Amino acid sequence: MKDELTELVPSLRKFAYSLTGNMHDADDLLQNTLEKLLSKPLPEQVTLMAWAFRVCRNCWIDEYRAKKVRSNASEALTYETETVNSNSSMDDTVAQTITLRQVSSAMDELPCEQRETLSLVAIQGMSYADASEVLQVPTGTIMSRLARARVKISNLLNGQNEVLS
């Protein structure tokens, strides 16, 4: 199980980042997730991947609720840029940073269910069936959430205020 879990760490880290919005919180969430995964046995008839993503999501929900109770003020997101390719021009770097912020900001506008679904399918590359197993909802619900998320993201990025819910 530890070898399989080691292979899942990069995907779990990306998922944690998509939930938290910054790398420091994502790393903390990943650590909490791994601690819980290693401290309990794998439930019967559940794949390690689905269980790991579900545990990560549940840890994030627990932390989100705890932060909400402690503080009603929203914290501004910190955008961290990874090492920039030295060959790229300053204009390209600025354009990439602006686009990253726009997409991140648009994803923040999504309801939690749509953001999770979009992250699992579009960013993690999970199939609808795998995302359905992780989020414990029917596949049709995954497809519906994904469609609504894509429309809203597209409208937000194109500057349209009218968004389907």
Image: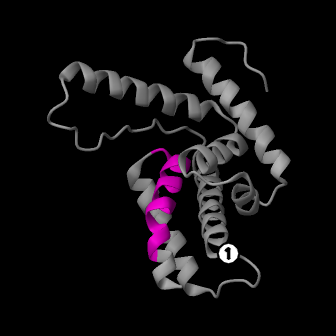
Chief SS of the magenta region: helix
Q: Local crowd at mark 1 within 10 Å, few (<14), some, or many (≥20)? A: few
- Which residue lies most toward the left here? 86
* Residue 130 percent coordinates (x, y): 70, 60
Asked whether 13 falls inside the magenta stretch, the response is yes
**Mark 1 belongs to which amino acid?**
Thr
Name the residue: 33% across, 41% down.
80
Q: Is residue 132 left or right of residue 63?
A: right
Q: How is the image coloured?
A: one colour
- Left-right relation of 80 to 44: left
Local secondary structure at mark 1: loop
The image shows residue 162, relative to residue 165, as above or below, that is above
Figure quadrant of the C terminus: top right
Does 99 appear above or below 158?
A: below
Residue 7 coordinates in the image, percent (x, y): 46, 71
- Residue plotted at (57% across, 14% down): 158
- The residue depicted at 67 percent of the width and 75 percent of the height is 47
| Viewer-side residue, 143 vs 13 | 143
Quadrant where the N terminus is found in the figure: bottom right
Front residue of this view, candidates 90 and 68: 90
Q: Which residues are magenta?
A: 6-21
Q: Is residue 11 magenta?
A: yes
Q: Write the residue at 62% across / 30% down.
A: 109
Depicted 147 relative to depicted 22: above or below: above
Residue matched to label 1: 47
